[in-house]
Image (cartoon, helix red, strand yellow):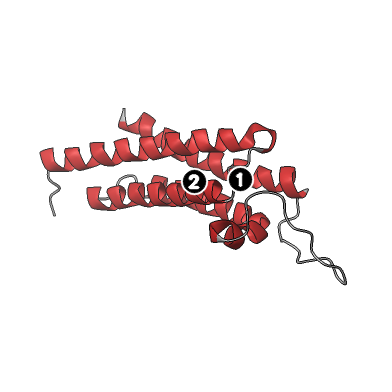
Amino acid sequence: MRTVLAALIALLALAIGILHFALDFVLFGGRFVSSGPPPGGPRRAPAGPPPGGIASIVGPHLPELFVANMVVFVVLAIVFLAFSRSRPPVRTAIDFLIVLVTVVTLACWYGIGRPNPRGLGRWAVTLEFALIAAALVHALIVSRRARIRPATA
């Protein structure tokens, strides 16, 4: 069961990373670096939530953040698999890091008004909640096994 759960966590992290990378193409036509206001012209007011809060921080940098999100989730999947035979505290810490990054991603999505271009927002959120649940269950299993069978130094 632990092997299946570990594979699921790695696949979910990769899927989330790929989905966020795809959003760069859907929303920005494959432009990975945001451009500032048009030269010589005033910037139009953006549609969506009012300025301020997380939207004012995240919104102008979405193309870069989607790429960064993809990189972070791919790296997390690789780290998760690379340390799959480490001591339980290390594996549990990686599980909680996955949960933390995923929660921050969800918080940013909620903060910018929960956009759902072509239904990809809902897919991403569904995968992210599944990843959170899987990582928490994995952390629970790992910590229980460590208490039952302490590691020898």
For label 1, the residue is 20
For label 2, the residue is 106
Q: Residue furthest bottom?
A: 40
At 31% from the left and 27% from the top, the residue drawn is: 1
Would residue 65 be seen by someone viewing this image from the given angle?
Answer: yes
Figure label count: 2
Tell us which disc is closer to us: 2 or 1.
2
Measure how far apart labels 2 and 1 are at the Cα level: 12 Å
Q: Residue furthest right?
A: 40
Residue type for callout 2: Leu
Would residue 149 be seen by someone viewing this image from the given angle?
Answer: no
At 78% from the left and 66% from the top, the residue drawn is: 37
At 72% from the left and 50% from the top, the residue drawn is: 47
Earlier along the polypeptide chain: callout 2 or callout 1? 1
Residue 120 placement: quadrant: top right
Left of 140 or right of it: where is 27?
A: right
Are there few (<14), some (14-19), or many (20+) residues within 10 Å of tag 2?
Answer: some
